């Protein structure tokens, strides 16, 4: 029994010794099995002047950068490029990160799908420097892709998001806006639609309705209209032929004509049931409007004239007035503002009550516009601001359901509801002198 136990001990010692010998003498794995320490490629986006992206079994898409920095697709057909998509590609190449080096000197690229790549990206940089990136098959785990540079025997793996960021088709790369115009350069918008066309012109402080009459304008509403026109995109899943057939029998919605630094362009919009189609002077053919944009665009085009008019009675916005003159029956006061102090007839006034009147004047807005009923005003208000350089005067006549107001700068009449008018009159009556200082 003792001999048997000794024999077992000898065998165990031998096994342990073998393991120790193997551990101390095994070789470090070659570089092809270690994590990569260097990026596959470094590209300065500002230096790239041209890109060609070739997907397997699809025509290559060639893009060039103009002197102004804008990207243009030149093949397979000329059109503007989507600046954000191109920027994303260049961002993925700056640098192009790797996960691992799979082979330092691959003699055959076929096992990696790089002999006939899924995607080939040719870059041209300033000084005619060129690079070609090859994207091959997915790795067996499916979370990475094989990558190589043309002319180099080294094969890398890169994360799958890299492939998704670089594998772009013509439809991905094209500018899908139907009116790809710089909205900041637009000076006029002419909206031809039923029942009433309306024209807008840009002025120093925003926009002005020019037709059918010169009206004070809600600049926010016009800016939203311009945004919807210049951001509306095509639905690339609908073929041009299908869009053209639908457009031919669709109901006209509106035709917008915008003029800017680059000239005048138009967008004709029609509706077929719940779908919208457009013909743009900047693009050949007809397109279905993307559902992401069509609802907002149709709402903006369908706004009534009064929706574009400015319903605010006073124009000082969030600027503190310098002076307020308010006269209505037995309530008559003149408030002067300097710093944080309000005074009236040389007396310091209660700040909170004065600010309540300012808020009521700031919020004074019409519910709609009317054409008559203003004969004998009972409230007269003048607000001065901007260092005494700007003044607005409003007269109000009370009615059974509120009041009718008129500004001093035009014939427009504004209907005010009773709640709004009561808040104003109560705020004016509530202005009071400041409490005397507490005795020490």
Image: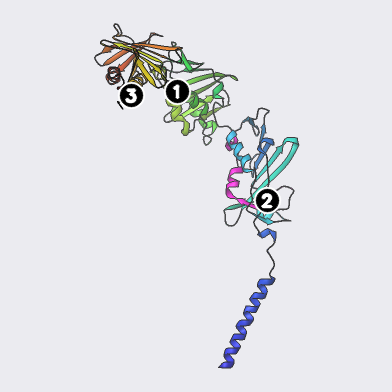
Q: Residue furthest top?
A: 375
Q: Viewer-proximal residue, 334 or 238? A: 334
The mark that comes first in sequence, 2 or 1, is 2
Q: What's the residue at 67%, 47% (across, down)? A: 134
Q: Position of residue 201 (x, y in %)?
A: 50, 15
Q: What's the residue at 58%, 35% (across, down)? A: 84
The answer to which quarter of the image holds residue 437 is top left
Q: Give the colouring mode of the picture.
A: rainbow
Q: CA distance from mark 3 to mark 2?
A: 65 Å
Q: Which residue is tagged 2?
A: 38
Residue 59 marker: none
Q: Viewer-proximal residue, 2 or 431? A: 431
Disc 3 vs disc 2: which is toward the camera?
A: 3
Residue 235 visible within the image: yes
Is disc 1 placed on a helix, strand or loop?
A: helix
Highlighted range, magenta: 148-174
In the rendered structure, does residue 431 fall within the stretch colored magenta? no
Q: Position of residue 290 (x, y in %)?
A: 49, 33
Q: Viewer-proximal residue, 377 or 437? A: 437
Is disc 2 placed on a helix, strand or loop?
A: loop
**Number of residues whose C-alpha sits closer than 10 Å to that of mark 3, classed few (under 14), some (14–19) or many (20 or more):** some
Q: Which residue is tagged 1?
A: 220
**Number of residues whose C-alpha sits closer than 10 Å to that of mark 2, classed few (under 14), some (14–19) or many (20 or more):** some
Q: Position of residue 425 (x, y in %)?
A: 28, 17
Report the side of 281 relative to 365 (left or right): right
Residue 352 marker: 3
Q: Position of residue 253 (x, y in %)?
A: 44, 22
Report the side of 408 relative to 118 (left or right): left
């Amino acid at each position: 029994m003792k001999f048997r136990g000794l024999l077992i001990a000898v065998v165990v010692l031998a096994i342990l010794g073998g393991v120790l010998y193997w551990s101390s003498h095994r070789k470090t794995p070659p570089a092809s099995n270690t994590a990569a320490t260097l990026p596959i490629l470094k590209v300065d986006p500002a230096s790239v002047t041209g890109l060609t992206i070739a997907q397997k079994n699809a025509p290559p898409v060639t893009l060039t950068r103009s002197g102004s920095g804008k990207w243009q697709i030149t093949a397979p057909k000329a059109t503007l490029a989507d600046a954000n998509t191109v920027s994303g590609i260049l961002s993925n190449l700056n640098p192009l990160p790797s996960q691992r080096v799979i082979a330092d000197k691959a003699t055959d690229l076929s096992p990696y799908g790089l002999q006939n790549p899924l995607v080939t990206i040719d870059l041209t940089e300033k000084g005619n420097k060129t690079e070609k990136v090859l994207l091959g098959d997915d790795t067996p785990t499916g979370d990475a892709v094989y990558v190589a540079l043309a002319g180099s025997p080294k094969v890398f793996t890169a994360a799958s998001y890299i492939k998704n960021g670089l594998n772009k088709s013509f439809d991905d790369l094209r500018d899908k806006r139907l009116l790809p115009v710089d909205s900041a350069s637009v000076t006029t918008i002419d909206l031809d639609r039923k029942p009433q066309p309306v024209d807008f012109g840009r002025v120093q402080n925003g926009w002005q309705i020019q037709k059918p009459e010169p009206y004070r304008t809600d600049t926010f509403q016009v800016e939203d209209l311009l945004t919807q026109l210049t951001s509306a995109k095509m639905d690339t899943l609908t073929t041009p032929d299908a869009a053209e057939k639908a457009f031919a029998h669709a109901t006209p919605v509106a035709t917008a004509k915008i003029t800017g630094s680059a000239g005048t362009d138009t967008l004709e919009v029609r509706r077929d049931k719940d779908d919208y189609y457009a013909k743009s002077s900047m693009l050949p053919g007809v397109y279905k409007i993307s559902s992401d944009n069509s609802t907002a665009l149709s709402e903006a085009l369908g706004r009534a004239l009064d929706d574009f008019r400015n319903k605010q009675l006073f124009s000082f916005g969030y600027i503190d007035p310098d002076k307020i003159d308010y006269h209505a029956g037995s309530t008559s006061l003149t408030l002067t503002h300097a710093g944080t102090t309000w005074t009236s007839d040389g007396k310091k006034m209660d700040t909170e009550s004065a600010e309540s009147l300012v808020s009521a004047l700031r919020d004074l807005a019409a519910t709609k516009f009317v054409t008559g009923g203003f004969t004998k005003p009972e409230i007269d208000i003048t607000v001065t601001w901007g260092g005494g350089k700007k003044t607005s005067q409003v007269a109000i006549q009370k009615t059974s359901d509120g009041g009718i107001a008129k500004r001093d700068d035009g014939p427009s009449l504004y209907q005010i509801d009773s709640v709004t008018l009561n808040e104003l009159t109560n705020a004016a009556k509530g202005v009071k002198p400041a409490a005397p200082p507490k005795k020490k």
